[in-house]
Structure formats: structure tokens, C-alpha cells
Image: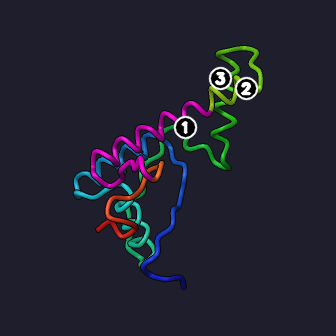
Amino acid sequence: MGDETSRTVVKTYIPEYQKDEWQSHADELDMSQSEFVRAMVQAGRKGFEINPVETPEGGANPGGSELKTRLLETLAAEGHLSWDELVERLAGDFEDRLENVLDELQSANRVQYSGRRGGYELVGGADGH
């Protein structure tokens, strides 16, 4: 086992409807989305039954095919695109989402921009205090 005081990042990709449901539930519990996900995973590991979220028709993109789907949709809408144009279209979405998350975390006083250090950092350090 690792050091119990150190933290690391875990990333996953879920359908937008599911993220919205998790965010609503986290808000009801006065928790951040990260705290909510961590608590639900731990609860599941301890054997508590959690009612699964119903998946709408079509479901999630299993096997990481979200990028493939977005690529096909972009080409269908745009026609011919160069490599650089594809990167711009597909990466732009990520940059928009990143900016939205950073804005949200800064508004919640969880992350701040440090001009002196030239980047973002957790407010109060890794433990949040």
C-alpha cells in the first residue's frame, strides 16, 4: 500500500448524462464531484448495493471508441480535413472542457492560478487545507 496521505489523479470517461446525474447527486450531498465518485467507489467496494444508473438507448462508448465517434462525426460534418485541422477540432473540445473545469474549481476556491509559479495549484496544498 502507498502512503495514505499522498494523492494521485484517476481519470475516466463517462457519458455526459451520467456526469450530470452524478453532479446533481453530489450537489445534494454538498460534495464535490470527485468526493462523490470516491465515496461511491469505496461504498461499492465495501459491498453496499448502489442502484445502477439506467443507460439511455445506445449506451456509453465501450472500448474507448468516443474519439472514433467524434472523429467520424467531425468528418461527416466538415468533409475533408487535414491532420492539423482534425487535431484543432478534436483538441479544442478538450481545451474548452478543461477551461470550464478550471473555472468551476477556481470559483469553489479549490484551485488557483499562480503567476509567480506560472501555473495552477491546489488551494492549501495537496490536502486542501
Residue at the limit of the structure toward the front, as seen here: 116
Q: Count neighbours of disc 3 (C-alpha within 10 A) and say few if under 14, some if 14 to 19, many if 20 or more.
A: some
Q: Give the residue type that dot 2 points to.
A: Asp
As displayed, is residue 119 above or below residue 4?
above
**Magenta-span inclusion, residue 93:** yes
- For this view, does 38 lie left or right of residue 27? right
The one nearer the camera, 27 or 126, is 126
- Residue under label 3: 74
Kindly state the secondary structure of the residue where label 1 is placed: helix
- Residue under label 1: 94
Residue at the limit of the structure toward the bottom, as seen here: 1
Query: How far separated are the C-alphas under marks 1 and 2?
Result: 15 Å
As displayed, is residue 80 above or below residue 106?
above
Residue 121 position within the rendered picture, expressed as x and y whole percent measured from the top left: 41, 56
Q: Between disc 3 and disc 1, whose residue precedes?
A: 3
Kindly state the secondary structure of the residue where label 3 is placed: helix
Q: Give the residue type that dot 1 points to.
A: Phe
- The residue sitting at 48% across, 41% down in the picture is 98
Q: Which numbered marker is on residue 116?
A: none
Q: Give the residue type that dot 3 points to.
A: Thr
Q: Between disc 1 and disc 2, whose residue precedes?
A: 2
Q: Between disc 3 and disc 2, whose residue precedes?
A: 3
Kindly state the secondary structure of the residue where label 2 is placed: helix
Q: Give the residues in magenta.
A: 91-116
The one nearer the camera, 13 or 48, is 13
Residue 30 position within the rendered picture, expressed as x and y whole percent measured from the top left: 22, 57
Query: How far separated are the C-alphas under marks 3 and 1?
Result: 14 Å
Residue 1 position within the rendered picture, expressed as x and y whole percent measured from the top left: 54, 85
- The residue sitting at 51% across, 62% down in the picture is 9
- Residue under label 2: 84
Q: In which quarter of the image is residue 42?
A: bottom left
